[in-house]
Image: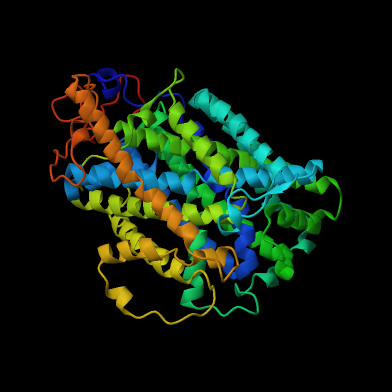
Amino acid sequence: MASIQEAVPEKGLAKGTNWWGAFVIGLAGTILVTGIAPFVVQGTGALGIILMGVMTIAGCFLCFCLAELATMWPDRTGGIPSFATESFRPLVGNTAARHIGGTSGWAYWLGWFPVAPINVILTASYLAVLFKFSPGHLIDPVGTTWGTPIGITIVLVCFALLILIFIPAYLGIRLGAAFATVLGVLSMLPITVMIFLPFFKPSSIHWSNVAGFHAPPHIVVTLTFVCAWFFPILWNVIAMEAAACYVGECRGGARDAKIALTAEGLFGVFIYIMTPLMFVAVLGLALTTADPLTLYVTYTRHIFGTGSWVEWFVGIPLIAALALSVLNAIMGVGRSLYQAAEDGLLPRWFEHKNRHGVPDYAMAFNVVCSMILVLLGSPLRIYIISNGGYLLSCSLAFLGYFVYRQLRPDTPRPFRLPTVAKWFALGVFIVWTFIYFFGGWNSPKIVVGPTQGPGLYLLGLAIVWTFIYFFGGWNSPKVILANPNQGPGLYLLGLLIVALYAPLYWWRKWQDNRLAARGRLPEAVPAAASAGLGSGASAPDGQSAAGLPAGDDGVVGPVGGSEASPGDPPAAR
């Protein structure tokens, strides 16, 4: 029987990779350990091992939940937000579900694309250290309120890196996966090896530094302290979900989705727990910096002693790791924007594909936006803007998983978690929403603050979610930038960018209405594409993953997606 791709060939992206391609590009999420581990262990000591470990396990569980969803809708690309529409449809109907998916996609874009400017700034700085060139004359194009001075040479190197890394992304998923494989080996192999290096010199390991998982001497550990640190940790340690962005381009469909996400989650647990563990065991209280290059060099010198080669031994893997994360930031959320546009939620411009079968316009949009954020000069300021979207999208993924398992328990699934998993998913959603509000609110202090009233625990889930979204990061600039006088402007800018989803959708609606009036609306556009924002119309739940209404030529399979084409690998259960 015909698949959706055969019935509507212009829908979807080319099937140009397999589980390995999704896995290695998704390593960009795991590689973020290079940034968060030094930051956390400096601020929380051995306690940071527990804090990172707990949330990393939750992130691994997120990968398992996404694996189940991905095997049901293997043709949807873009990761977390691409599944939101389908998973919420049984609860809220088609129109509301589509807008939940669109909002999730826009928030996910805000969460991931800033990884590119953050990492090219770090990469350019490390190249200046390794090759000993001047950062150039300092400029401050956005002012000291929004940014920090940055060298003009660093800016030019950043722009050049973004363009160079865009090239393999533009030339197709196959080349992108090959490029990611090279970067992944150059980065993850040395970073993984560095975890084991101290065992070859046992005298460098001091387990007493880890015993009791104590915080630094001047720190008083409270619920406020823990939640405040969970807030920035969650921007990093759950990022191995990035592999889900590419399962829609895997030739093996459900089988590849399950393997890629399971492998990514398990490897992420190992890296995110063992890295801070070994940092503390080797360095102890010598954690005097949060800069990844400086800390990794210090760590390596404690094992091998000093030597000029150490900077290169550490610097090259770090640069490769950062470059891989930039590649994913360009490619991954480019697919999220593409999927939202294909669903009729964002302007048709994002739906454009080049001859290599990839969303070139959406990826180019990411590059241009990244260049603009480079001008802020400060990775931490960029992070504050980004965090307004990422945790929102990831938390919605857990709620969506619970909704679909609860309301559609008998729908066939090529990969199925135990039934109890839906309750774990709901629990993580509640905890994460609380962290997003309570942790974000108190993160400027990271110390004991005014006691929050118990009324927060009694609020309904919807009220809590709305409340935390607007207040969770209000004061986070003060903590992240270590400046008590820093205002909430960066956080508000992040919220403003998320809110731009509405005018973008209205723009798409206007485009579709104009084309319909001329009789030029493509048949492949979802039937609900021209529905008004907030309309109460709903479609049957049997709508295909590609957004085709019942009655189209595409054959809908038993799990809501297309039937497997002849020759596809059997679905694993």
Residue 409 coordinates in the image, percent (x, y): 21, 48
**Is 216 located above or below residue 252 in the figure?**
below
Residue 461 coordinates in the image, percent (x, y): 27, 64
Q: Looking at the rendering, which quadrant does residue 204 occupy? A: bottom right
Q: Could you tell whether 203 is left or right of 237 in the image?
A: right
**Is 568 located above or below residue 561 in the figure?**
above
Q: Residue furthest right?
A: 307
Residue 172 coordinates in the image, percent (x, y): 49, 24
The residue that appears at 43% across and 28% down in the rendered structure is: 359
Q: Which quadrant holds the N terminus?
A: top left
Residue 573 visible in image: no
Residue 250 visible in image: yes
The residue that appears at 64% across and 39% down in the rendered structure is: 158
**Is 285 located above or below residue 249 in the figure?**
below
Residue 319 coordinates in the image, percent (x, y): 68, 42
Q: Could you tell whether 113 is left or right of 341 in the image?
A: right
Observer-nearest residue: 169 or 263? 169
Q: Could you tell whether 454 is left or right of 273 in the image?
A: left
The residue that appears at 40% across and 28% down in the rendered structure is: 252
